[in-house]
Amino acid sequence: MLAVLALITVAVLALTQLTLVVIPVLIALVLAAAISPLVGLMRRRGMPSLLATVIALVTLVAVLAGVVWLVAAAVVAQWASLREQALEGFTQLQDYVQGLPFEITEEQIQSVQDSALELLQSNAVSSGALAGASQTFDFVAGFVIFVVVLFFFLKDGPQIWEFMLRPFEGARYERGRRIGHSTVGTLGGYVRGTAIVAAADAIFIGIGLAIVGVPLALPLAVLVFLLAFIPLVGATLAGVLAALVALVALGPVEALIVVGIVVLVNQLEGNFLQPVVMARTLSLHPLVILVALTAGTVLVGLTGAVLAVPIAASIWGAIQVWDGPNQPAWFARKKDRSLA
């Protein structure tokens, strides 16, 4: 056990040093599992494999580009109004601070502003800009790797897995096939189910924000959709951010209304929609989800928080089919002992 734990530790540390390659490959694997049914449907309708793969890949990239364009257009259109509201909110906060029981002078407030301006003009910000340029290069390289790997996963995924199973025969080969099918099914079901739940959250919360009159309702709705892929904490973070925007732009009453909308939508989603959509895909205890979420965040950051839970679910799915279809290994051993 110590040797196995040591090997796993070394493997995890090695993977964390190769995030530029590992993360795009994992994301491509998850998305390939999610949209593989679409590619399979087009192939069964007689479409060539290459054409079906290209259509699925172009559709995915077009949807992502369209979402980014809509968010950018909404931010640009409402930026001036939001800036004025933010400045007004800052002025109100400044007046509130000056009205506190203890004295805060204008000189102290000006000193804080000067310190912030000095920080923006310091070498630390310059080095941060260089780091940002490096991160931009890493992002572009990772995106290229992601697109290429996703293309081959969609086009030749089953053949790639069969090639990896070539050293195995008999029962070990069948086990490898079961694990492959279980992993693809779990990852694909998780992404599709989470996307349905996230879309419902984003639509209803976005409508609520628009009715209340919160600026940047569309970008906030998109953020709700994206953060929904982080279990347990994503919806809370999105609600807090929407409430802060409403507080700065509109006031405390509207912020409380936004909080109520977010809580209501999350309750409806958690009690009605998620059990129906995700029940067969994510059969993990909340404690396991929390541990996987924490470990992924510590090791890889935000990307790890998104990928940790589906990876943990796929590992649990592989354990369940280790000794047979839909039969956990511990259950098979227990059954054998009872028969003996």
Image (spheres, rainbow, N blue to C red):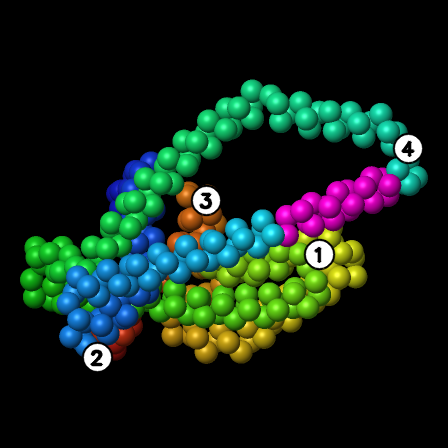
The question of residue 83 being in magenta is answered with yes
> Of the residues shown, which amino acid type is indicated by label 1?
Ala
Name the residue: 30% across, 59% down: 58
Between the C-alphas of marks 4 and 2, the distance is 80 Å
Question: In the rendered structure, which amino acid carries the disc numbered 3?
Answer: Gly
* Residue 291 seen: no
Label 3 and label 4: CA atoms lie apart by 41 Å
Q: Name the residue under label 1.
A: 246
Secondary structure, mark 4, is loop
Q: Which amino acid does label 4 sit on?
A: Glu
The answer to the question of whether label 3 and label 1 lie on touching residues, with beta carbons closer than 8 A, is no
| Crowd rating for badge 3 (residues with CA inside 10 Å; few <14, some 14–19, many 20+) | few
Mark 3 lies on a secondary structure that is loop
Residue farthest toward the top in the current orientation of the protein? 123
Which numbered disc, 3 or 1, marks the residue closer to the eye?
Answer: 1
Q: Mark 2 points at which residue?
A: 339
Asked whether the beta carbons under mark 2 and mark 3 sit within 8 Å of each other, the answer is no
Going from the N terminus, do you reach mark 2 or mark 1 first?
Answer: 1
Comes first in the chain, label 4 or label 1: 4
Mark 4, residues whose alpha carbon is within 10 Å: few (<14), some, or many (≥20)? few
Above or below, comparing residue 335 to residue 164 in the picture: below
- The residue labelled by disc 3 is 301
* Magenta residues, start to end: 78-97
Which corner quadrant holds the C terminus? Answer: bottom left
Q: How many numbered badges does the structure rendering display?
A: 4
Task: Say whether disc 3 or disc 1 marks the residue closer to the N-terminus.
Answer: 1
**Location of mark 4 (residue):** 103
243 over 108 or under it: above or below: below
